[in-house]
Image (cartoon, rainbow, N blue to C red):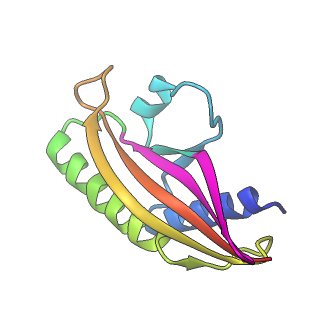
Amino acid sequence: MSYLSDLRTYIETQVALVDSSIIIENDPFGDIDVNNALAQKFYKLVFGEMLGSRLGNYETEEMQMKLIIFSPRKRDENAAFYDLYEKAIEIKNNIIRSVDLPSAPCTTTIFFNSLFPEKELTDDNAFKITINFTVRTDLNI
């Protein structure tokens, strides 16, 4: 397995621990399938920019990671919103900690940056929650 595959598996496991009915959208760069979003709960995992810095024999790499959770269309929008918001917080809490990835010969820590709920633009009864993280890997070289 590779580092990103291991990281993705870790995130999938943490999401499933909170709600196994939330499924992953497997297209990291494609547009969101709005029909899918309105039919069921799903999430999209996007790995972003990676930056590195070095000081002596010590190197740090930081990668931006975004988890976007979509709610299906619901009649009781208020209850659905609070339910998904609470699940997003629980997922965030599961994810942020030191992570032991089999393919990483180093320490990987995931930091929480922000959580942002918003209406889905195509439907008044659907919404999404975006959670932004920084994945830091510390290497001794």
Where residue 138 appears, as percent x and y from the top left, is: 65, 74
In magenta segment, residue 5: no
Of 5 and 40, the residue lying toward us = 5
Where residue 107 appears, as percent x and y from the top left, is: 66, 79
Quadrant in which the N terminus is drawn: bottom right
* Residue 109 appears anywhere in the view: yes
Of 21 and 67, the residue lying toward us = 67
In magenta segment, residue 60: yes
In the picture as drawn, the residue positioned furthest to the top comes out as 122
Report which quarter residue 71 is drawn in: top left
Up the image or down, 109 lies above or below 83; here it is below
* Residue 17 appears anywhere in the view: no
Q: Main secondary structure of the magenta part?
A: strand
Q: Which residue is drawn at 27% across and 44% down?
A: 117
Report which quarter residue 27 is drawn in: top right
Of 18 and 107, the residue lying toward us = 107
Up the image or down, 35 lies above or below 20; here it is above
The magenta segment is 47-71
In this picture, residue 103 sits left or right of residue 138? right
Where residue 14 appears, as percent x and y from the top left, is: 53, 67
Quadrant in which the C terminus is drawn: bottom right
Q: Residue at x 42, y 52 (%)?
A: 132
Q: Residue at x 71, y 74 (%)?
A: 101
Q: Residue at x 18, y 50 (%)?
A: 79
In this picture, residue 92 sits left or right of residue 57? left
In this picture, residue 129 sits left or right of residue 104? left
